[in-house]
């Protein structure tokens, strides 16, 4: 007997995913649009300041709610899309620091680096 299986690994908006959308799927279970971090798929822009549109039910939040410690090890910048998927909410993957956000002239004011100082990243060990 031959058994086969398939899995779809695309993002919500593209056939080929990027690391931001791939990491969001891995860490939160949400299939999101390419280029976004912590933004629910109903948002058409790549970022939003509206907290109700942020993905807040990922593995990190679940572990912290149980009183356990969270940390991560990375070989890239901690603001890069893959590790940032653990903590960044409602932001474009390219807005790693405030200068990038200002140059993009977007309404979102919470770049990835700034979010390292707030929950859930502020609870990392």
Image: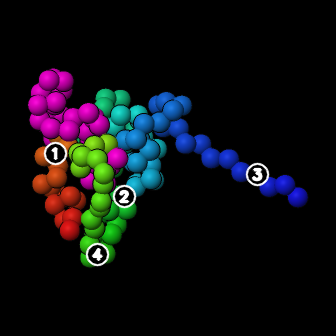
Badge 4 marks a residue whose secondary structure is loop
Q: Earlier in the sequence, mark 1 or mark 3?
A: 3
Labelled pair 2, 1 in contact (Cβ < 8 Å): no
What residue sits right under mark 4 in the picture?
68
Instruction: Give the percent coordinates (x, y) of residue 31.
Output: 46, 44
Q: Quadrant of the N terminus?
A: bottom right
Upstream in sequence: badge 2 or badge 3: 3
* Residue at the disc numbered 1: 113
Disc on the earlier residue, 4 or 3:
3
Work out how far the residue at label 4 is from the one at label 1, CA to CA, in angstroms: 23 Å
- The label on residue 61 is none
* Quarter holding residue 125: bottom left
Magenta stretch holds residue 108: yes
Residue 106's spot in the image, x, y percent?
A: 18, 26
Numbered tag placed on residue 4 in the rendering: 3
Which residue is disc 2 drawn over?
58
Circle 2 crowding by C-alpha within 10 Å: few under 14, some 14–19, many from 20: some
């Amino acid at each position: 007997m031959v058994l086969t299986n398939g899995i779809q690994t695309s993002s919500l908006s593209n056939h080929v995913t990027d690391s931001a959308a791939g990491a969001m799927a891995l860490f939160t279970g949400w299939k999101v649009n390419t280029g976004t971090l912590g933004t629910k798929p109903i948002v058409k822009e790549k970022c939003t300041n509206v907290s109700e549109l942020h993905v807040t039910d990922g593995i990190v939040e679940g572990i912290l709610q149980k009183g356990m410690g969270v940390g991560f090890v990375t070989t890239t910048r901690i603001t890069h899309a893959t590790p940032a998927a653990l903590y960044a909410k409602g932001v474009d993957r390219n807005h790693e620091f405030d200068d990038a956000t200002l140059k993009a002239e977007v309404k979102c004011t919470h770049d990835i680096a700034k979010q390292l100082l707030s929950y859930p990243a502020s609870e990392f060990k």
